Amino acid sequence: MNYFAVPLDMHDLQIQLSRDAGIPIAEQISTAIGASIRNGQLYSGARLPSWRDLSAQLGVARGTVRVAYEHLIDEQLIVSRGAAGTFVAHQGLVANDTDTSELRSPLPDFFTHPFSQAPLIFQMGVPAQDVFPAKLWSRLISAAARQAATNCSVSYPDPRGERVLRTEIAAYLSVARGLSCTPEQIIMTNGYTGALGLIIHALGLKDHTAWIEEPGYPLTRTALRMAGLKPIAVNIDEQGLCVSEGIAQAPQASLAVVTAGQQAPLGMTLSLSRRHQLLDWAQQTNSWIIEDDYLSELQLLGRAAPALASLDRCGRVIHVGTFSKTISPSLRMGFIVVPVEHANHFADVAAALAPASSILTQLALAEFMRKGHYLRHLRRMKRVYKNRLEALRLALQLPNTSNAMTGLALLFRLPEHVDDTAIAQQAAALNLAPSPLSAWYSKPNTAQSGLLLGITNLPEEGLDISCEQLRQLIEGHI
Ligand SMILES: Cc1ncc(COP(=O)(O)O)c(C=O)c1O
């Protein structure tokens, strides 16, 4: 998730200079770059070209570019990080957001990560690379390819996904998530994000108001906004989403998106009384609940609570599952479980707008589950992650892990005045990728400071050095 690996392409900088305009060249450069930052073309965290490169590209003196950059630094649109380079400042996009009083938008820097790259130490959101059963998976994919080629059919596949897979998922949900459903209620999607698009279309939620968690998964906020909804950030306390606050703040909402199992990023489980309160609200107002079950039963401390959808007697919860954390995000495999009475409608919308993809992956996944590999893999992951968590706790010399554990990360809280984003940016230069807690908040003014340290990809050797580096960075800011 470290955007620093992506320096800005010089072609992204559209700067037209005119020597006859009567405006100093340095000012023309700073005006053009400033405009690109304000209109979002240059995203927060992007690295600007060096003075040398930009001056060569524009055919001006280096000193002219330096003056332009200094002006932008004064305006707090860019920041210089010494030898690491000059970057678009964190608040660049926010400063231009017409809606700052409400919610930050679009995606904070730490979620615009370079794709298809090996994860860095402390990076969140990706499972352990060394635990992925690569050999077994490639055998299953080969077998699936043979099966698909042998049974080669020229008709369209089921837009909901292959029945064998949906049958396996239904069986898994009943055992592992306490959720009883039929394969007809399940629709395969392109991960959680694909599910979100399908649900919004199927329920006709455009222009409606939605509660989201504060703090919460930034992609949810961005996706809802892009789909034309109005997200309202509702605070989280030790029991999870504050439902009564949601009702007071936005009684007209038609949707609530919750991570009931393990709140992202703080990790608490939505309490039973809050679950009932939320379900009652949805029933009384005919609203919908999207349950983002991103970690499924992958809970390291204690037992995972059953899915919220298992308590739903009124058909208001759409349960969303994903294999991104439990196997790999590269599968792009997610699914939704739809209340029985809406199953046909959702199937129609999937057929028209978002049919299930890649039969090969579906068949391989079905076999992975059918033969018991999935449950074994989950057990192994839990073991490995518990060991890594313990190793990190020791390396950081933290006394009590359970206080700080959040999903698959350790939360290291920082005093309010400490700029967690600045620390994370400096850590990036050391190839460490802690996630700043403040970036998970919609409202920058009330964001809390902290670092989320992903435990999934920690090296066996050298972890203490990485922790020491991080500690020194933190001390430099306290
Ligand atoms: C809260 C939350 N929901 C869902 C996802 C998974 O999304 P997808 O299935 O699209 O990979 C993530 C991944 O980081 C997440 O943190």
Image: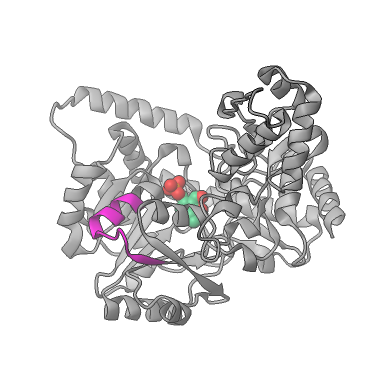
What is the x, y in percent for residue 386?
A: 63, 55
Q: Which residues are magenta?
A: 196-210
197 in magenta: yes
Instruction: Please give left or right for residue 82 compared with residue 319 in the image.
Output: right
Which residue is located at x 67 percent, y 18 percent? Answer: 57
Q: Position of residue 36 (x, y in %)?
A: 57, 38
Residue 178 visible in the shown view: no
| Quarter of the rendering occupied by the N terminus | top right
In the picture, the quarter occupied by the C terminus is: bottom right
In percent of the image, x 66 and y 67: which residue is there?
A: 402
Rendering coords of residue 171 (x, y %):
30, 55
Q: Is residue 232 magenta?
A: no
Q: Position of residue 427 (x, y in %)?
A: 75, 44
Q: Is residue 363 visible?
A: yes
**Residue in front for this viewpoint, 104 or 149:** 104
Q: Is residue 407 above or below residue 13?
A: below
Q: Is 362 located above or below residue 472 in the figure?
A: above
- 59 sits left or right of 288 in the view: right
Query: With respect to residue 119, does 405 lie above or below?
Result: below
Residue extending farthest to the left is 155
Counting the numbered discs, the total is 0
Residue in front for this viewpoint, 288 or 170: 288
Q: Would residue 417 be found to the left or right of residue 244 on screen?
A: right
Query: In the image, what residue occupies the spot 63% across and 48% down?
Result: 92
Query: Residue at left 62%, top 44%?
Result: 44
In which quadrant of the rendered view does residue 29 lie? top right
Q: Is residue 430 above or below residue 322?
A: above
